[in-house]
Amino acid sequence: MILTITLNPSIDRRYYIKGFEKDKVVRAEDVQYTPGGKGLNVTRVVKKFTNSVMATGFIGGKSGSFIKEKLDELEINNKFIPISGETRSCLAIHSDDGSKTEILEKGPIISNKEILKFNDLYNELLEESEIICASGSLPQGLPIETYKDMISVAKAKNKKFILDTSGDALKKGIEASPFLVKPNKEELEKLAGHAITSNDEVIRASKYLLENDIEIIVVSLGKDGAIVFNRGYAYKINIPNIKAINSVGSGDSMIAGFAISLLEKYDFEYMLKLASACGTANAMEEETGKVDVDNVKSIINEVSITKLKL
């Protein structure tokens, strides 16, 4: 089974507004609500390919009930720890000029009692899981070492752990040597402490991560594809040009592709193509964390890979 972890989920609220301006009364042309948080985006894409997925994390209040209800409607297995606080909302305002404004709530404060309950659930779910995907920010109340500790527990049970987060949570997580990490260029710049302006600089900056015994490092470059590091080689992934509608969630969809490939034990280069195709296909959809499987199959044939010896 693939276990997806979303410790700080949200309701993603998307507003489509013509001519959005500050200090004005505006009316939305369309509004969409979906269960959000990076881990739940991963979950929905994985579900397109397999039923062997379980979603977990913290949910609370009416918003938490909405998320569980929607996951149940999609027939996605889920076991969350209920919390006393209210699950957050994240707003995205899309305007007809192509601009997008995001407003992200911090989320609830998780109590020590709720953390202990989650730790027990996590250990229970690990027994049934082969691949663990932990994505997104840590909610208030959780120690910065949370992902690091989760990785250590998973590795002790010979489970493959995929980590997709940022900031100090990523720095600490790297110390435990997860199986796969996926920083984007901006996150890699923060880890390296300097700006990155070329693929050669991506390779040089990634050496810091390579020293931490991480099996696979994926540096996502948006429309320019990605550079992936594994066993002494760098792989430059080039993706086809598409008509992008909403690129939010493409990184999460890419993570889903990696998780599916590891579960199905696909060969390495096919895994790179499937993961890249999932990320690209997500950008073709209005909804975040959604892919059309037919689009994925078509894109796979157009993904090219250049292998470089480090």
Image: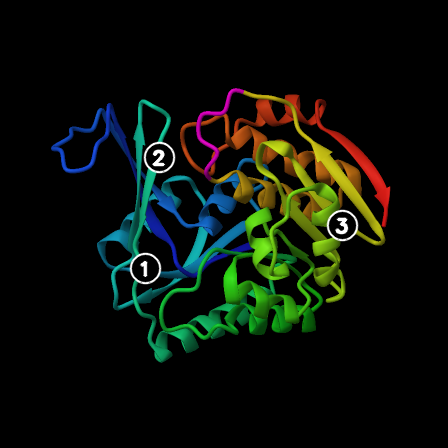
Report the residue at 45% width, 75% height from top. 143
Q: Is residue 61 left or right of residue 238?
A: left
Residue 150: name its quadrant. Answer: bottom right
Q: Is residue 304 left or right of residue 9?
A: right
Q: Check if residue 286 falls in the magenta segment.
A: no
Report the residue at 56% width, 21% height from top. 242
Report the residue at 41% width, 32% height from top. 287
- Which type of secondary structure does the marked residue at label 2 adopt? strand
Magenta stretch, main secondary structure class: loop
Q: Is residue 24 left or right of residue 66?
A: left
- Which type of secondary structure does the marked residue at label 3 adopt? strand
Amino acid bearing label 1: Lys
Amino acid bearing label 2: Lys
| Residue 131 picture location, percent across and down | 63, 56
Question: Which of the two labelled residues, at mark 2 and mark 1, occupies the earlier sequence position?
Answer: 2
* Magenta-highlighted residues: 243-248
Nearer-the-camera pick, 105 or 290: 105
Which residue is labeled 3 in the image? Answer: 229
Nearer-the-camera pick, 217 or 204: 204
The reply to whether callout 1 and callout 3 are in contact (CB within 8 Å) is no
Which residue is labeled 1 in the image? Answer: 106
